[in-house]
Amino acid sequence: MAHVLFVSKPVQPPWNDSSKNLVRDVASHLRRYRGRVMVRAGAAPPEGAEALPVYGPGAGGFGPPLLDNLRVLAALGFERRSKLWHFFFAPNPRSSAAARLTARARRRPTVQTLCSAPPAEVDLARVLFADVNVVLSAHTEERLRAAGIPARRIPPAIPAIEVPSQGERIRVRAQLGLPPGPLVVYPGDLEFGGGGRRVLEAVAGLPDTHLVMACRAKTERAASVEAELRAWADRQLGPRVSWFGETPHIHGLLGTADVVALPSETLYAKMDYPLVLLEAMSMERPVIVAEGTPAEELAAGGGAVAVAPDTDAVREALSQLLDDAARAADVGAAGRAKVLAEHDPCRMARAYEEVYDSVLSS
């Protein structure tokens, strides 16, 4: 059985990062290949995969420090078991150049999954180096093709999550100190895309609706943005907004929400189909996304609601879903059906195995 080396952040808990979750679910569902994943020293790999201790004890953040990047390069220089290297990171000139040179020196075929689309100003020819580039959405696939770069599209996947009962949803709300009544959850970051402010402004115009901001910090700018938004929310919403930050209760929040909204006009530094939205859809929660982004594709077949990235449009969509239980149930059911059919980990792993077959046979 041929080994594939997955080059990524440490693939281990906490499972709070889309790219390492993607690696976990590919590596643990392979059948004809054996995955080797990079972990911190002493950590166990996901079931079905092998561990390659690479990272130091403090590794695992969203932006690996220089020392950890050097450890990855050293591992690539000496690792001998794997016949193919599969990279999972947002392309940037420095990392891509190092990966390209190392792969050529070691004569290793390569696959690169673009976990998030490069910024519009990036020269794709400079940062895409692999024998096969894999994208997650039609949106990014078209961008690469327009630049003359072929790509394979393999949608991301999540393990299916059970639909919570009404009793479970009530119990979770009580445990988390959330009030009864209409509940909206925003599970995005605050620095990019304006989604956080847009949802706050939309909910401000919906009396009796409570909003949960489940936002994680991705950059040093996050604290100042949150402080500004909190000050505005204190004036406009008062106790109708709860700030959970990065929380271990995200699945509970998603499951108890009446609507999950992520209407950010850019998904910079996020996966094309944010896994948190797939998780919400798996639990039959209606989801709102922004038009013009890769996430708009989730609305195909009625599995989500895509709206213009505008406060009034977001407010109208929220109002319709909160006031029309049948409409919300239809969107939720269509969303779960879409996730089960199109975002299954076994299906995703089979697609990657076909890519590995083609690369190794060429």
Image (cartoon, rainbow, N blue to C red):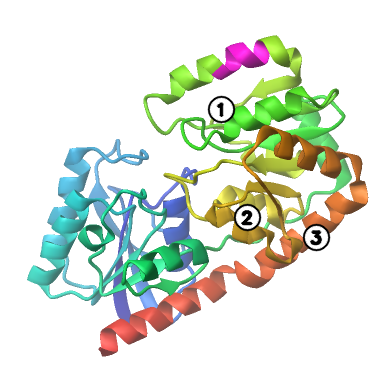
Residue under label 2, please give it.
278
- Which comes before the other along the chain, label 2 or label 3? 2
Q: Is residue 230 magenta?
A: yes
Q: Position of residue 189 (x, y in %)?
A: 51, 34
Residue under label 1, please give it.
245
Q: In this view of the protein, which residue sits in the foreground, 110 or 42?
A: 110
Q: Is residue 78 shown to the viewer in this render? A: no
- Which comes before the other along the chain, label 3 or label 1? 1
| Rendering quarter of residue 80 | bottom left
Residue 122, compared with residue 247, is above or below; it is below
Mark nearest the camera among 3 and 1 is 3
Q: Quadrant of the C terminus?
A: bottom left
Looking at the rendering, the stretch of residues picked out in magenta corresponds to: 229-234
The three-letter amino acid code for the residue at tag 3 is Ala
Question: Mark 2 near mark 3, Cβ–Cβ under 8 Å?
Answer: no
Q: Position of residue 91 (x, y in %)?
A: 29, 54
Q: Which mark is residue 333?
A: 3
Characterize the magenta stretch by its predominant secondary structure.
helix
